[in-house]
Amino acid sequence: MEKQVIISISREYGSQGHIVAEMIAEKLKLPLYDRKILEDISANNGLKLAELEKLDEQPRSHLFTRRLGNHSTSLEDHLLGMQFNYLKEKADAKESFVVVGRCSEVVLKDREGLITIFIVGDKEEKLKNIMDKFGISREEAEMKRVRHDRRRKAYHNEYSEVKWGDSRGYDICVNVTRLGLEKTAEFLETYIEARIKNF
């Protein structure tokens, strides 16, 4: 790809936004950064992956966190900083990529080639997706959906002036239930290709 393009995809839990991200990355032949960020940080810093996963996309605990200037005792903040630096290094190296979550639309907001997407879905469809994936009841799926979205919202809003899911903070928001996975991915690929021409 001649021009650098960074595609940041945020999503509601159960919307299958991660699958859409995978489809876009495959179609455009771009690397996908999601859990791989943690794997690389773990390998490069001698840290246990399982411990990093517990802290991933978690808001800091205000009860147990102390701050002095830009310094924090929060392990969540330290991991976030490592992930932010990871993404900045990839962007500084002029790499094009797709990234899922990690406040990427915030940390990379000044990059010319950034395209930000937020993926939502109808509640019943999201619950069905969660039930099918984990083999759980509707009630369990609803609790899981609410818990994950609450956590993502708190995490995002801790580090961004724009609220998680607020359409004004993204280039485009799309409901995957309307078109289905494949057509949503195709629609977004068309949008991305049009945007790249205007960079």
Image (spheres, rainbow, N blue to C red):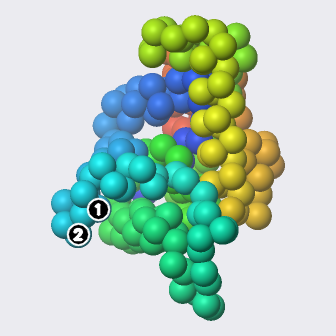
Snapshot quadrant of residue 85: bottom left
Snapshot quadrant of residue 139: top right
Task: State how many labels appear.
Answer: 2
Residue sitting at x 19%, y 60%? 43
Residue 33 visible in the shown view: no
Residue sitting at x 77%, y 52%? 163
Whether residue 94 is situated above or below residue 3 in the rendered picture: below
The amino acid type, in three-letter code, at marker 1 is Ile
Snapshot quadrant of residue 14: top right
Percent across and percent down for residue 151 are 63, 45
The amino acid type, in three-letter code, at marker 2 is Asn
Q: Nearer the viewer, residue 111 or 102?
A: 102
The residues tagged by marks 2 and 1 sit, at their Cα atoms, a distance apart of: 6 Å
Name the quarter where the C terminus is drawn.
bottom right
Residue sitting at x 24%, y 57%? 48
The local secondary structure at tag 1 comes to helix
Residue 135 visible in the shown view: yes
Could you tell whether 29 is left or right of 148 in the image?
A: left
Q: Residue furthest front?
A: 63
Crowding at dot 1, Cα within 10 Å, few <14 / some 14-19 / many 20+, comes out as some
Percent across and percent down for residue 129 are 54, 13
The local secondary structure at tag 2 comes to helix
- Do labels 2 and 1 touch, CB within 8 Å? yes
Could you tell whether 94 is left or right of 129 in the image?
A: left
The residue that disc 2 covers is 45
The residue that disc 1 covers is 41
Percent across and percent down for residue 41 are 29, 62
